[in-house]
Amino acid sequence: MPTALDRVQVSHFVAEESFARHLDDLDPCSAFRSRFAVPCGNAAQPNVYFVGNSLGAMPLATRTMLMEELDDWSTLGVEGHFHAKRPWYSWHEQVREPLARLVGAKPSEVVAMNSLTTNLHLMLTTFYRPEGNRTKILIEKGAFPSDIFALRSHVAARGLDPDVHVIEIAARVDEWLLDETDIEAECERLGDTLACAVLPGVQYRTGQAFDLARLTRAVHAVGATCGFDLAHAAGNIDVQLTASMCDFAVWCSYKYLNAGAGAVGGCFVAERHGRDTSLPRLAGWWGNDPTTRFQMSDRFIPVASADAWQLSNPPILSLVPLLASLQIFDEATIPVLRRKSIVMTGYLEYLIRDALRGHAELLTPASASRRGCQLSLLFKDNARARFGALTAAGIVCDYREPGIVRLAPTPLYNTFHEVWRAAQAVKSACVS
């Protein structure tokens, strides 16, 4: 149901501090901030934590839930696998449904396991199958280095030259944003030489969001498989993986999903593939059908779901923060958070756009449908010093080469007044 905040338009924005306070009064998500330990620094002048795109704040419930697991371990020992408050044997099943709701998938299509890059390697083992003329794998130029490393190593492991078979598609000359029509044209150009594409949900440096269904159609049109890196999309934008028809996706959980440093990642395998137990994959005991798992057979019988790509039993203590966060996401709901995010990011842009002229370029798309909650500012000079000025003013953000400052107001726990404060600091940094 629409809220008063949903009806706020750009034309309604006012630069005064009182208007930011007014937006906070309208915020339907304001109560969720108290459920997080937001790093605030000096109590007299609290920091503005705008770096949830790098490491999300800790859900307060994490501490209690961790102690419950430790208590069960200390008192039950091995019996905790079946008799703990949250039995360890089936513990990972607790995050399945909320994780599916978060990324627009069926419960059987998602699994929380490993880390993003490990999951990408597992997916490539299944979905990058070079054969005959179809050997190329497509990725954006400027993707997060770990993705590039994974793709190049897979190509090399198949006895192929990464310099020839890994195709990187770049933005146009003197542009930062990758045009989706160019991706479509590149897929068409590669034709039956394309085996697989690994594309971004949200680009990590620019904050550009992509149309997953559109890109999937372009990749599938030439007979290739399509996967997505959702590191900066999961928990940020309204992702609809099942509807996109993509083949697979991977993401981390320590950014917008607030599951802590090095958190357990997530993986999506489309139902049509999960049901195909003949697919090649790397196998482990935990991917074996649970109805036969304890027969200790030496023959791998994959369960007909995304769970089949699991290798080992889930790390309980590492999953606790993810469950604590997903419970909050379930209460808030992605559609409501997304609507707040659109207003919040739009308000930040409104407040700083004039100040940026002559000093910095806003790399992130202006259209709300083409971005998440991140704004990326490319400073023309003295970028490190300007970033330092923001830090000194209590704005916790991050820096990426070459001269990019990323600000990410997160709708679960950031406020509109913090947006206003950050904007004042950006204006000062531009003229300092």
Image (cartoon, rainbow, N blue to C red):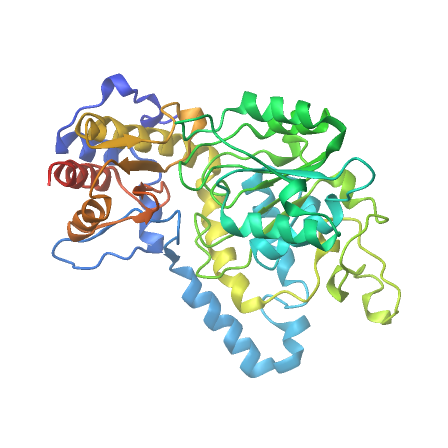
How many numbered discs sit on the rendered protein?
A: 0
Q: Is residue 202 left or right of residue 274?
A: left
Image x and y of residue 50, in percent: 30, 46
Q: Residue at x 65, y 56 (%)?
A: 93
Front-most of 318 and 200? 200
The part of the image, by quadrant, that contains residue 9 is top left
Front-most of 247 and 68? 247
Q: What is the quadrant of the N terminus in the image?
A: top left
Image x and y of residue 254, in percent: 46, 55
The part of the image, by quadrant, that contains residue 4 is top left
Q: Is residue 394 above or below residue 431?
A: below
Image x and y of residue 15, in percent: 16, 27
Q: Residue at x 82, y 70 (%)?
A: 294
Q: Is residue 426 above or below residue 4?
A: below
Q: Is residue 372 visible?
A: yes
Q: Residue at x 22, y 23 (%)?
A: 13
Image x and y of residue 131, in percent: 81, 41
Q: Residue at x 70, y 59 (%)?
A: 310
Seen as rendered, the residue at the extreme top is: 11
Front-most of 98 and 215? 215
Q: Is residue 1 visible?
A: no
Q: Is residue 154 left or right of residue 257?
A: right
Q: What is the quadrant of the C terminus in the image?
A: top left
